[in-house]
C-alpha cells in the first residue's frame, strides 16, 4: 500500500462504497482542506491496479468499493496502524483531557 492517502481511502471504503467526491469530502473533514481530483483519482487508480478497489459506473459517476483482497488488506493495515500509533493516540487523549480540566 502506498502511504496514508491509500490507507484512508481504504478505511472510508471499508465502511461503505463511495464516489470519489465523497472520499474527498471525508478527507476535507479530517484535515481541513479538500484534496484535488489530481490527488484522489490517481490513488484510486493505484488501488484498482493492485486489485484492492473496484469501480462501477453509476450514471455519470463512478462508485468505488473494496474487493475481497481490499477488505483483507484494509483490516491488516488498520490493525498495523493502530498498533504502531497507539502510544501517540494515548498521548493525544491525555492532552485533550488535560485541556478540559
Image: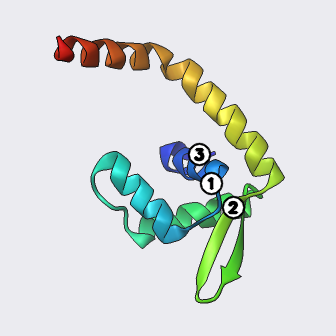
Q: Secondary structure at mark 3?
A: helix
- The quarter of the picture where the C terminus appears is top left
Q: Residues within 10 Å of mark 3 (few under 14, many from 20)?
A: some
Q: Is residue 95 left or right of residue 35?
A: left
Q: Is residue 99 above or below residue 27?
A: above
- How far apart marks 1 and 2 lie (CA) works out to 6 Å
CB under 8 Å between callouts 1 and 2?
Answer: yes
Q: Residue at x 64, y 72 (%)?
A: 63
- How far apart marks 3 and 2 lie (CA) works out to 11 Å
State the residue position of label 2: 65
CB under 8 Å between callouts 3 and 2?
Answer: no
Asked where in the image residue 73 lies, by quadrant, the reply is top right
Q: Residue furthest bottom?
A: 60
Q: Is residue 31 left or right of residue 47?
A: left
Residue 82 at x, y = what percent? 56, 24
Query: Mark 2 or mark 3, which is nearer the start of the sequence?
Result: 3
Q: Residue at x 49, y 50 (%)?
A: 5
Query: Mark 2 or mark 1, which is nearer the start of the sequence?
Result: 1
State the residue position of label 1: 13
Q: Secondary structure at mark 1?
A: helix
CB under 8 Å between callouts 3 and 1?
Answer: yes
Q: Residues within 10 Å of mark 2 (few under 14, many from 20)?
A: many
Q: Secondary structure at mark 2?
A: strand
State the residue position of label 3: 11
- The quarter of the picture where the N terminus appears is top right
- How far apart marks 3 and 1 lie (CA) works out to 5 Å
Q: Residues within 10 Å of mark 1 (few under 14, many from 20)?
A: many
Residue 65 at x, y = what percent? 69, 61
Amino acid at each position: 500500500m502506498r502511504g496514508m492517502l491509500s490507507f484512508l481511502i481504504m478505511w472510508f471504503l471499508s465502511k461503505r462504497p463511495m464516489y470519489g467526491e465523497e472520499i474527498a469530502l471525508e478527507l476535507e473533514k479530517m484535515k481541513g482542506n479538500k484534496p484535488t481530483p489530481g490527488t484522489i483519482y490517481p490513488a484510486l487508480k493505484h488501488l484498482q491496479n493492485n486489485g484492492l478497489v473496484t469501480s462501477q459506473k453509476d450514471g455519470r459517476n463512478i462508485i468505488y468499493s473494496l474487493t475481497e483482497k481490499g477488505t483483507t488488506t484494509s483490516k491488516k493495515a488498520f490493525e498495523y496502524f493502530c498498533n504502531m500509533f497507539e502510544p501517540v493516540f494515548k498521548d493525544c487523549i491525555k492532552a485533550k483531557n488535560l485541556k478540559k480540566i
